[in-house]
Image (tube, grey):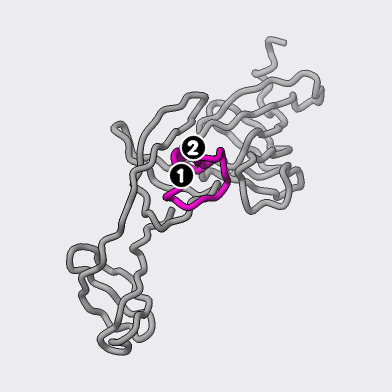
Amino acid sequence: MDDPLQRVAIPCPACSPDSETVHEILKPGGQATVRCTACSHVHKEQLPEQQTETKDVVVSQDGESFSASVEVPTDESLAVGEEFLLETDEAIMTVRITSLEIDQGREEEAPAEEVQTIWTRGVGNVSVNVTAHPKGGGHDETRSFSLQVPGDYEFTVDETEELGGEEFTVEGILLRDDATGYEHEKLDFEGDMAIAKDIKRLYARDQSTSAWSAW
């Protein structure tokens, strides 16, 4: 959900006093400083107050979930895959919408006024599951582990990573259902890249011999 007041349609005293033009908000407040996108005139205006509603939010992260709430503009439309900042008692976190609950059930897109609960998952910092096989081969001798990384951390097929005491080369990337902007659900060509918050599982070749010493 983008900030609805980044741009606003109001009359411009310089070029359009009788009709609305799009203005950028340079400084919000009671008397906001705005700039007309048509003629670049900067002036101060009293902006109309925006109506909002409080919506319940359920956040899932690392196998656990908790409830919170958020103020949403009533005239806004919400959709699965959108991200927004959620302020809780503990922290401010980035979450991604995974489902919208309305009277008739779950929807992927709905007007904010019809939404009862916004289901989300935390994407600021995420756990990425990794399935690794020994670098000598043997896909039947795999081991699994999880990595804690920032949501925007990039993983690329055929690149070697050293994270959390693990060293491995990415061989395949399985994407989450809510990941957008990718051509396929699984990426396995050299140079294919995905960010951590979009990844369901990494398939990798282990580069550390010590990890297999107990086998």
| 73 is higher (above) or lower (below) than 215 | below
Choose between 173 and 15: the one closer to the eye.
15
What residue span does the magenta drawing correspond to? 95-118
Please rate how many residues cluster around mark 2, counting C-alpha atoms within 10 Å: few if below 14, some from 14 to 19, many from 20: many
Disc 1 versus disc 2: distance between alpha carbons?
A: 10 Å
Residue 117: horizontal and vertical position, in percent?
45, 38
Residue drawn at 70 percent across, 43 percent down: 157
Q: Where, by quadrant of the figure, is residue 99 drawn?
A: top right
Give above or below for 111 relative to 59: below
Nearer to the camera, 167 or 50: 50
Left or right placement of residue 170 versus residue 93 in this view: right
Give the label, 1 or 2, closer to the camera.
Answer: 1
Res 119 label: 2
As drawn, the residue found furthest toward the bottom would be 15
Q: Nearer the viewer, residue 139 or 32?
A: 32
Residue 170 drawn at (x, y percent): 69, 37
Amino acid at the residue labelled 2: Trp
User: Looking at the picture, which amino acid does disc 1 mark?
Assistant: Val
Q: In the drawing, what numbered circle is on residue 115?
A: 1
Q: Is residue 125 located in the magenta-colored stretch of the structure?
A: no
Given the current orientation, which residue lies at the most extreme front position?
104
Under circle 2, the secondary element is strand
Give the main secondary structure of the magenta stretch: strand
Q: Secondary structure at mark 1?
A: loop
Q: In the displayed structure, would residue 50 be above or below residue 68?
A: below
Lateral position of residue 116 relative to residue 164, left or right: left
Residue 174, given in percent of the width and then of the height, sits at 69, 38
Name the residue at 26% across, 61% down. Answer: 49
**From the viewer's perspective, is residue 36 above or below residue 130?**
below
